[in-house]
Amino acid sequence: MNELAVIDELVAEVMGKHEYTSLDVAKRFNKRHDNVLRDIKRIRRDCSDKFWRLNFEESSRTIKTGNGTVREFPMYRMTRDGFTVLVMGFTGKEAARWKELYIRAFNKMEEELKKRLLQNNTISFAEALAVAVNKLKIEESSEHLQSIGEQIN
């Protein structure tokens, strides 16, 4: 498979879908679902509350067993960002392949953005990046001030 086809595959897989479940992830990466749930719980412990609330949601699935009883099993729904954070922590051949594809797709996107910025004679890539970083810093400062305010109240 050529590089563009591989990148198209990744874009279709990640960018085309806006919600994933822990079941999707377990199947896609050939992992046991209980291990995926464990990894998601670790993310909960390590990430910010805001990131968690925006990107992960506890859920369940109902399964009818062979003897007719119905059981509830836990699972998570997640956004594309939640999926990406989860998968970036995986190891193994499939996870490494996915990370390589992700990096290649990001690099191609960066190339395209640079090309467009230069063609339009707008701002340089470095200037665009600086603007993005400053916006993130302002966002983080605002969140920090908000958390301090919550602690005082």
Image: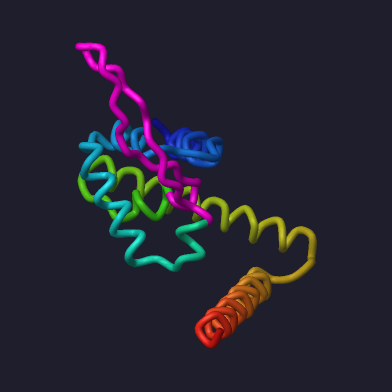
Residue 138 location (% of width, % of height): 63, 79
Q: Is residue 59 magenta?
A: yes
Q: Which residues are magenta?
A: 54-82
Quadrant where the N terminus lies? Answer: top left
Q: For the point 53% across and 36% down, which residue is it? A: 17
Q: For the point 35% across and 44% down, which residue is it? A: 98
Res 34 → quadrant: top left
Point out the residue furthest to the bottom here.
152
Give the camera-side residue of 85 and 56: 56
Residue 39 location (% of width, % of height): 27, 52
Quadrant where the C terminus lies? Answer: bottom right
Res 123 → quadrant: bottom right
Q: State left or right for residue 5 relative to residue 110.
A: left
Q: For the point 53% across and 85% down, which residue is it? A: 148
Residue 6 location (% of width, % of height): 43, 36
Vertical placement of 125 versus 137: above or below? Answer: above
Q: State left or right for residue 85 relative to residue 133.
A: left
Q: Majority secondary structure of the magenta segment? A: strand
Number of on-image labels: 0
